[in-house]
Image (cartoon, rainbow, N blue to C red):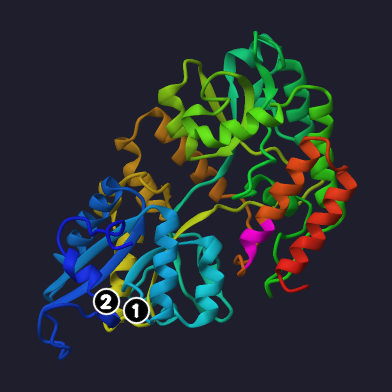
Amino acid sequence: MAAILAACGRGDAAQNSGGGGGAGAGDDGSGGGPITMRTALWGNADRAQLYEEATAMYADTLEEDVTFDMSFAELGPYLERLATTAAANDLPDVFFMRDTHLGWYGQSGSLLDLTPYLGNIIQTDQIAEAAIGDGTVGDGVYALPTHYVGQALFYDVEMLQEAGIDGTAITTWDDLAEAARAAHGIREGVVGLDDPTMDNSTQRFLEAYIRQAGEEVFTPDGGIGFSEDTIGSWLEFWHQLRSDGVLTPPDVSLENDAAGVAGSMIATNRCALALMSTNHYVQVLPVTQNELALASLPVLPDGTDDWWFFPPILICAGANTQHPEIAAGLINFLVNDIEAGKHTLLNQGAPSSAAVRDAILPLLDDGQRAFVEQISREQEYPRRPFPVRPQGSEEVNASIGRNSTAVAYGQMSVADAAAAIVAESKAAMGGA
């Protein structure tokens, strides 16, 4: 693990020393000497270098002699390391967090409550009010979003034109189904719509559908907020398209998951329409041969208008930090500073700060700009609070993916799968 989490640049020894509380080598604890603070993120060395440079920019603004040591790893090992250090009360001073894990860390007392610093050290005027809710657990604010990704519809412009479909007119789920049927087979080997239901890691499109239906995946107290009827209608929508033969076959869907974004059906021009994370548009455009357009997710015609949500990349501080004001200042810097935003650009998504998003637009290419502009446009729509994912949320995602896959292979009926998802999800949440 120490090798995986090798520090980017300086501070390798400090990172693995296990010295607790955020005061590292060279800090005598009196507040008058040099201070070493630990930061951490998931990703590769390029990302770590960007953020090491950004934290150095922040250090240059301080009166204190502060050095930030950066550690990083791929997501799986990174989360394992966080769990270990949280158990030892030795979390990094400032680190990035997935929304899927915030609930447990916030409830366990492992994170610094940022509430006293909001509007003071941490400015919130450039992030939407809902952004505070993204990091709220109980009565405390334990994280803030630095960046957002989203959910979107990608479509092949020429394929839809050949099928007589105006991609900009696809606004409802029924519109999407009609377009998929019309475009299926428009070219040899092309399916109408990629099947998004078999992903075991995240179910963002289903979450949007559930919120459009006026429900939530999770309740504020950590229970299950969706019904069998809503899950059933979602599964039935895809089952009908599968029965019509216009979806990606199950075996191909599973292969595509392993191939990543660059090997996806839409990137390799094997489907006319696909639901994907909005930020994937930036990754798909350079590898595809066709013109692809980006649109918002379809909606239920009688659904709620405040369903919008944006999966956040969160930043937080360890409750064990010995320098909470410096930690809060770094969080503010990475959320709000224009120059830091210009330096890191879209490495983790679209910046949560509207001012930073506007400032970086001239630096982006057409695909990057389309991604950021879509996030900015959708941020203007009404959004009700999005309940923080409780501990066990990944088991819910796994249940949805597992039972959806059984439906796709004809091993389970829609009704049985919907009942199983609700039952298994309630069990994962302790029966709530």
Return the x and y of residue 244 as percentages of the image width and height: 83, 23
Residue lying furthest bottom: 30
Depth check: give the residue in front, 80 or 386: 80
Name the residue: 45% across, 26% down: 285
Return the x and y of residue 237 as percentages of the image width and height: 81, 37
In the picture of the structure, the residue carrying the numbered disc 1 is 90
In this rendering, the answer to whether 209 lies above or below 364 is below
Badge 2 amino acid: Gly
Q: Earlier in the sequence, mark 2 or mark 1?
A: 2
**Whole-number angstrom distance, CA of label 2 to CA of label 1:** 7 Å
Residue 395 drawn in magenta: yes
Q: Residues within 10 Å of mark 2 (few under 14, many from 20)?
A: some
In the picture of the structure, the residue carrying the numbered disc 2 is 18
In this rendering, the answer to whether 129 lies above or below 110 is above
Return the x and y of residue 153 as percentages of the image width and height: 61, 33
What SS does tag 2 mark?
loop
Tell whether label 1 touches label 2 (CB within 8 Å): yes
Name the residue: 50% across, 16% down: 290
Of the 4 image quadrants, the one containing the C terminus is bottom right
User: Mark number for residue 46?
Assistant: none
Depth check: give the residue in front, 167 or 406: 406
What SS does tag 1 mark?
loop
Name the residue: 86% across, 55% down: 419
The stretch of residues the image draws in magenta is 392-396
